[in-house]
Amino acid sequence: MPKSMQLEVITPSKLFYKGEVELVIVRTLTGDEGFMAGHTWAVKLLDAGELWFQEAGSKDFRVTAIAGGYIDVKDNIIIFTDAAEWPEDIDVERAQREKEKAENWLKNPSDDDSEIARAKIAILKSLTRMRVKEGGHRRKR
Amino acid sequence: MAASNMRDIKRRIKSVNGMEHITNAMKLVSAAKLRKAKSTFERTRKYFHFVTESIEEIFNNTSEVPVCYLKGNREIKKTCFIIMTSARGLCGSFNSNVIKKAAEQIAECKEKPYITAVGLKGKEYFMKRGYDIKGEYMLPPETISFIETQEISKPIIDMYNSEQIDEVVMIYTTFVNSMEQAVKSVTLLPFEIDKDPDLPKLEKMVDYEPSVDDVFNYLVPKYVEIMVYGAIVESATCEHAARRMAMESATDNAREMIEELNLFYNRTRQAAITNEISEIVGGADALK
């Protein structure tokens, strides 16, 4: 059995998750990355995407949707994110609606660059939500 | 004459009684809201320090950090004030305390500052006096989510980055306890930080990805966002505490007034009766 470490997922309003885990997989700005106990110390920025982790002693992965943030890898792992959701808390219809709204912005683009960027982030977030609800893109391993 | 006087007093007792009911109900509502706001506030406060710690850690462990967010990188000309007041009144001196402090600080500025108003009361005050209101948030603050606060803080960070403003100061009320709140002003940007020699160097190399600059430039705005969020939550807690106190003293005053009026009413009534008896006795004496 691999060594375990402590994972804390923190959002501005609460401690979202705290527990012993063996493996954490996050989407950094440069791609998906997995961390196990004893990893080099690192601070990496995260993109909006799925967060996977395997609790100590468990075979299955738990998946959550997170909205960007950063991961602080020391002897323990701290993930700080703007928002995090368990699959059971995700409202698919709302995500769908938000995605459509953002797509409409893109179809009628204004001159404002930041609005396009925001629409893209909104689409990414709702896509993540929908995928997490279905069990994530890594459904079967 | 005495009868109409008595009717007047009775009417006043009735209206004060009605007022007492309302203030008492508001007190109970505020107490319930305060309890809820306080639990949110306490939850958020616990995780605040993580971001500041990360910033300090990077600062203390790497030699080259980008200077644009740090104190002393450019002259401070234009200041943006974030002023947190309440959306509703009837909360004692809560709003006037914040506004007084803000007005003091604004008077010290050389250039006319920008104002970002959270809460209606502050906005009204500064709009009347002809300040530029750059941003506002008017909904009741106790239900605000972090994503919503980003809409307040994002434009401020953008303005700072494009050098429209050189300083961001936030004025809000801090929660000491349910009886006591204090107005506080915090400079959010530029970020003031010193190399702290006491802080032990990390024993291992830390990988920053994509780069130290990127991480640092991500963390500092995040720090601003989190501070703004925390201040709004705290200020909402204070608002309810202040309102509860104000309503409590209003209820007490109303009760005192009712007591006095009752006493006065009884005296007037007794005087009228005495008057009548003395008239009767006088009449009977005259007949003898």
Image: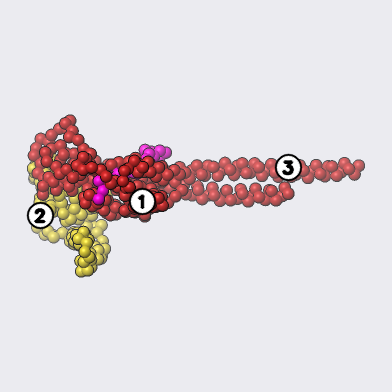
Chain colours: A yellow, B red
Q: Identify residue type, mark 2.
A: Gly
The residue positioned 9% from the left and 37% from the top of the image is B204
SS at circle 3: helix
The residue positioned 29% from the left and 46% from the top of the image is B79
> In this orientation, does residue B3 appear?
yes
Upstream in the sequence, badge 3 or badge 1? Answer: 1
Q: Position of residue A72 (x, y in %)?
A: 15, 44
Q: Residues within 10 Å of mark 3 (few under 14, many from 20)?
A: few
Residue A31, numbered label: 2
SS at circle 1: loop
The residue positioned 22% from the left and 48% from the top of the image is B221
The mark lying in front, picked from 1 and 2, is 1
Q: Position of residue B172 (x, y in %)?
A: 35, 44
Front residue of B167/B130: it is B130
The mark lying in front, picked from 3 and 1, is 1
The residue positioned 31% from the left and 53% from the top of the image is B134
Are tags 3 and 1 found on a single chain? yes
Q: Residue furthest top?
A: B198
The Cα atoms of the two marked residues, 3 and 2, are separated by 91 Å
Q: Residues within 10 Å of mark 1 (few under 14, many from 20)?
A: some
SS at circle 2: strand
Give the residue number, with chain letter if any, for mark 1: B131
Are tags 1 and 2 found on a single chain? no
Q: Position of residue B269 (x, y in %)?
A: 71, 45
Would you say A49 lies left or right of B7 here? left
Magenta stretch: dominant secondary structure: strand
> In this orientation, does residue A15 appear?
no
Give the residue number, with chain letter if any, for mark 3: B271
Query: What's the magenta region?
Result: B164-183
The Cα atoms of the two marked residues, 1 and 2, are separated by 46 Å
Q: Identify residue type, mark 3.
A: Ala
The quarter of the image holding the C terminus of chain B is top right
